[in-house]
Image: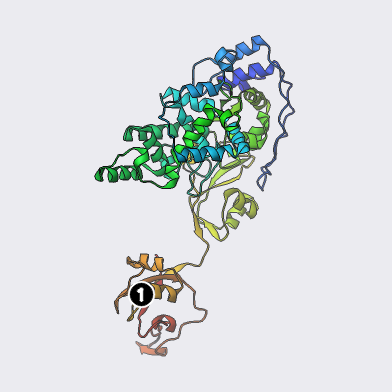
Amino acid sequence: MTLSSLSRLSPLLLAALLAACATTTPPMEAPASDTPPSPPPVATEAAPAAAPAVATAPVRVMAAELLEDNLRPGEKIDLDAPDASADLWVRLRQGFQLQDLDDDWVRKAEAWYSARPDYVERMTTRGSRYLFHIVDEVEKRGMPAELALLPFIESAFVTHAVSTAKATGMWQFMPATGRDFDLKQNIFRDDRRDVLASTRAALDYLGRLHKQFGDWHLALAAYNWGQGNVQKAIARNQKAGLPTDYASLKMPDETRYYVPKLQAVKNIVLNPDRYALSLPAVANHPYFLSVKIERDIDVALAAQLAGLTLDTFQQFNPQMNKPVILAAATQQVLLPYDQASAFAENLARHTGPLATWTAWVVPKTMSPADAAKRTGMAESALREINRIPPKMLVKAGSTLLVPRAPHVHDDVSERLADSASLSLAPDAPPLRRVTLKAGKGDTVAAIAARYKVRSEQVAQWNKVGSSARFKPGQAVVVYTAFKPTAAPAKTTVATRAVAKNGKATVRAAKPAVPRNLAKDRGGKGRNVVASAAP
């Protein structure tokens, strides 16, 4: 290995590489691609690499000297330490602090989970990958350990879960709330699905809510229902002279059921045998490590270099929206401990291109077909990879993911990686502004029906309510599709030649307003003036 290859690696990668080089058989090099593909590559699952032989004790000690856990920077990781083999469930139980609930809602939740042992097994097995890091973060903040169980009821630890209300990720952040807590959301990534970033944001949010309400049950209710709604419910009870605790507030059934579901999960963790359920063994050490990314790299290639299937890689790194990881925006990926060393070695040996995709800013509004021609892609491929629906134009300034040409060596800039967006416009005839005088009895609904537009649009254009009635003669604005006339418009006065100073001048009379605009079908004498839409 050359010094230049080693210089690309972070200390974590270098340490992992030292451990791997002593025991791992060099893998076959992936063939380099001379030209970027036109269609997006088919997402195939890479076969996991053969498991490396068990490292000797000296090598393992040497690697442990430099390895870092992302939550404990600067601290040594010793997987042979006595507490590393302890049961994380025991540590979790010892941190429980919340006052217990015991009511019919709790019984209902317990019965629901008890009747679904397969679901509980899948949920807890998924959660076992992330629990150590969440518990560690909760303990660092001095919070109740029950909060580490919240993803069980939010998403069942499905990192790419999306609710009907568009809440996303393991902690189910709404778009606006995610932005409030610095979770980036653009065409390349959605940090609401990022395991570490979303955990940090969720605990920040819960801490803020607890500070506001001074009660963890109310903070949890606000996490589910919104802090404004909880504050209003408290104010109503205060005005009525009623208690303001969680059980006394009037709230939707979903929120009423929220904390009891968490209590039921807590009860199962405390005594799974009581519910005829089992919990997977979870060791008290990091399940995954952070591995630094210094160049743009295709997701499929990263999975291959790590010896993971594409699906497994994405379970640890679900924030990626596109088939490429941009180093400027995603400085690290998460990999299971054993795969970190394989990734480091294979990355150092790889000589082909790391990224076959790049970002392109559309210079002017254009159709997907035109954009595809400009970038050398098939239109269907460009639409699919950039999720462009039919009958839409790509607006100027939008960012598209396109094949990376062989001569392009620069990675996507940090500015573009953070601000990339896709703006679309209907691929429809241009609209023009029509101003007419309302007749007797004209309403918003009547005008909308006459011009085949929605009542809400007419109301918005004229700044009135959807059920408004216009006064006779009132100016009404409508935007409608402009259809150019095929033949010249008729004139009201014949064209005539006028002799002036010995020269013939042709004067055309002013064209008459087309009949279908001059006299609206809905009534008599409605004057209409049409102009191009602004």
According to the image, label 1 marks what residue?
Answer: 443
- Nearest the viewer among 66 and 399 is 66
Quarter placement of the N terminus: top right
Q: Against 374, is 460 above or below?
A: below
Identified at 31% across, 39% down, the residue is 244
Q: Position of residue 109 (x, y in %)?
A: 51, 39
Quarter placement of the C terminus: bottom left
SS for dot 1: loop
Q: Is residue 517 visible?
A: yes
Q: Position of residue 141 (x, y in %)?
A: 41, 25
Q: Amino acid at mark 1?
A: Thr
- Nearest the viewer among 412 and 381 is 381
- Nearest the viewer among 353 and 314 is 314
323 displayed left or right of 456:
right
Q: Is residue 319 visible?
A: no
Q: Against 20, is 390 above or below?
A: below
Few, some or many residues within 10 Å of mark 1 (<14, 14–19, 20+): many
Q: Which picture quadrant has residue 223?
A: top left
Q: Position of residue 17 (x, y in %)?
A: 64, 19
Identified at 63% across, 33% down, the residue is 302
Render colour scheme: rainbow
- Nearest the viewer among 401 and 114 is 114
Q: Which picture quadrant has residue 368?
A: bottom right
Q: Against 201, is 472 above or below?
A: below
Q: How many marks?
A: 1
Q: Position of residue 13 (x, y in %)?
A: 59, 22
Q: Which picture quadrant has residue 212?
A: top left
